[in-house]
Image (tube, helix red, strand yellow):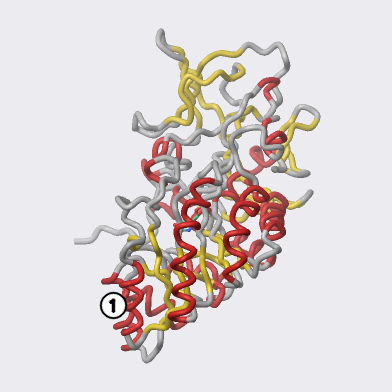
């Protein structure tokens, strides 16, 4: 579901006109719907009501403090992948004890910080990391709670850059070796074995890979329960969202249909129906680490058309937003629907255009050969489903300022992150020698 729709010919986020936000705050501008995020969290939480569970938002998808605050109030924990993310959780009023710390390259500084703050679990991805955490914990006079990330060797059927659960990926410890590594962990004096974790990839659009992974892992989890009395099993994130749909009538009507599962997509209920029967008999605490599915459809990136450049080969719609603001199309061939903020009338001519940014890279495009209603300089566009892996991947490339972020809640809205100033661009820099 989502809270973006046309009303009287204008695209709204909840009760707020996006054209108004764009004129007041400028573009490029990220806008998030609080209601959408809350509703997604509640739906997932409800779908899992039959399990002793905790939803740990994978905050790498969207780490704005206002978003974290919103989810912390709903009762979410957080899946973090760096010391900086833990710092953000604490600043947003979240608790370290509700955080699981993932990632293949944790540093001494990050491990010390996470130990000091008391994270719930370090999700460990290799033997050297296990030994290193043991050493750092010992030096700090602490016992580090750990879970091993197991790589179940299943095909998540997703883009190769976001598939993580095959044996050739860098993530986790192979399923055939996992019990041996737990036995090693049990011998290390400064570790406390607390759980087991897995995550097979992102933007997964079927339940099959999840079921396959869990079916492989359940016997191992049971063995770990009897050997070490583990208390949790984290089944990762990865539930996909709808990015693609028809634009007949110019309205993003496919968003409405998404919940009826018209397209290839799994809803939280399908997901829960597939995984709960496998997990319930374990009697363990189940952690989930959803990122995209909570926030992806809850955000849009607004841009203004700067020029329309017609060449014999193509028409380029050049916007003031670029790949530095939203890199998914360049990085993952990610698709974002693009709609004008003013609803196009039925008779408006359409044609194939490339929607591109101003950055000096040929990879700087949002859409190629896309049928869009005709636009002119000054028109405003929304790139839909940009709430996950959007702003968090933005950069200052080409010395472009990071965009502002707005959170809308009903008729209210506020600046969740101010647009960078030119002084921000050079903060910390000086002529060095
Ligand atoms: C990225 C990631 C997630 C979240 O994935 P989504 O597809 O955004 O739900 C969860 N767990 C781990 C370990 C991750 O790396």
Q: Quadrant of the C terminus?
A: bottom left
Image point (29%, 83%), residue name = 135
Taking the image as drawn, is residue 119 in sight?
no
How many numbered callouts? 1
Q: Residue at x 51, y 68 (%)?
A: 233
Give left or right: position of 402 versus 374.
left
Up-down: is 5 above or below 124?
above
Q: What percent of the width, then of the height, locates residue 65?
A: 58, 62
Question: Is residue 310 toward the left or the right of residue 271 in the image?
Answer: left
Give the camera-side residue of 388 and 175: 175
- Residue 243, horizontal then vertical, whole percent: 57, 36
Q: Is mark 1 within 8 Å of ligand 1?
A: no
For the residue pair 163 and 231, the one nearer the viewer reads as: 231
Q: Nearer the viewer, residue 117 or 344?
A: 117
The N terminus: image quadrant: top right
Work out whether 15 lies above or below 216: above
Image quadrant in which you'd find residue 14: top right
Residue at image x 45%, y 69%?
A: 196
Question: Outermost residue, left direction?
Answer: 433
The local secondary structure at tag 1 comes to helix
Whether residue 130 can be seen here:
yes
The single residue placed furthest to the bottom in the displayed view is 141
**Other-residue count near label 1 (Cα within 10 Å), few / some / many at <14 / 14–19 / ≥20:** some
Q: Is residue 12 above or below residue 315?
A: below
**Vertical position of residue 373 compared to residue 128: above or below:** above
Where is mark 1, residue-wise?
131
**Residue 141 x, y percent position in the rendering:** 37, 91
Residue 120 in percent (x, y) is at 51, 76
Tell me the quarter of the picture where residue 131 sits. Answer: bottom left
Instruction: Name the one closer to the observer, 271 or 397.
Output: 271
């Amino acid at each position: 579901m989502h809270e973006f729709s046309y009303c009287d010919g204008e695209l709204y986020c909840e009760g707020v006109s996006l054209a108004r936000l764009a004129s007041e705050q400028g573009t490029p501008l990220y806008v998030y719907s609080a209601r959408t995020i809350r509703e997604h969290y509640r739906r997932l939480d409800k779908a899992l009501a039959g399990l002793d569970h905790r939803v740990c938002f994978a905050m790498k998808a969207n780490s704005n403090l206002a978003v974290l605050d919103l989810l912390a109030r709903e009762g979410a924990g957080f899946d973090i992948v760096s010391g900086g993310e833990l710092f953000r959780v604490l600043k947003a009023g979240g608790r370290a004890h509700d955080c699981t710390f993932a990632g293949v390259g944790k540093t001494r500084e990050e491990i010390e910080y996470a130990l000091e703050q008391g994270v719930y679990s370090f999700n460990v991805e290799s033997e050297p990391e296990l030994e290193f955490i043991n050493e750092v914990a010992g030096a700090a006079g602490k016992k580090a709670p750990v879970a091993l990330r197991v790589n179940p060797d299943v095909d998540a059927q997703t883009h190769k850059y976001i598939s993580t659960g095959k044996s050739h990926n860098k993530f986790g410890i192979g399923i055939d070796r996992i019990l041996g590594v737990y036995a090693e962990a049990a011998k290390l004096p400064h570790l406390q074995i607390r759980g087991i974790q897995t995550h097979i990839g992102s933007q997964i659009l079927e339940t099959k890979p999840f079921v396959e992974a869990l079916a492989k892992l359940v016997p191992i989890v049971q063995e770990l329960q009897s050997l070490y009395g583990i208390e949790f099993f984290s089944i990762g994130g990865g539930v996909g969202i709808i990015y693609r749909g028809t634009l007949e009538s110019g309205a993003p009507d496919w968003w409405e249909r998404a919940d009826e599962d018209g397209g290839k997509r799994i809803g939280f209920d399908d997901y829960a129906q597939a995984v709960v029967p496998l997990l319930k008999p374990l009697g363990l605490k189940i952690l989930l680490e959803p990122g995209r599915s909570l926030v992806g459809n809850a955000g849009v990136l607004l841009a203004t058309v700067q020029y329309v450049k017609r060449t014999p080969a193509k028409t380029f719609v050049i916007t003031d937003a670029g790949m530095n603001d939203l890199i998914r199309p360049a990085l993952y061939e990610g698709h974002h629907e693009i709609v004008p903020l003013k609803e196009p009338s039925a008779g408006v001519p359409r044609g194939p255009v490339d929607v591109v940014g101003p950055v000096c890279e040929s990879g700087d495009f949002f859409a190629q050969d896309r049928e869009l209603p005709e636009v002119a300089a000054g028109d405003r566009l929304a790139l839909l489903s940009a709430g996950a892996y959007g702003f968090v991947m933005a950069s200052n490339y080409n010395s472009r300022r990071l965009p502002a972020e707005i959170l809308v809640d009903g008729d209210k809205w506020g600046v969740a992150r101010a647009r960078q100033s030119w002084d921000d661009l050079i903060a910390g820099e000086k002529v060095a020698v």
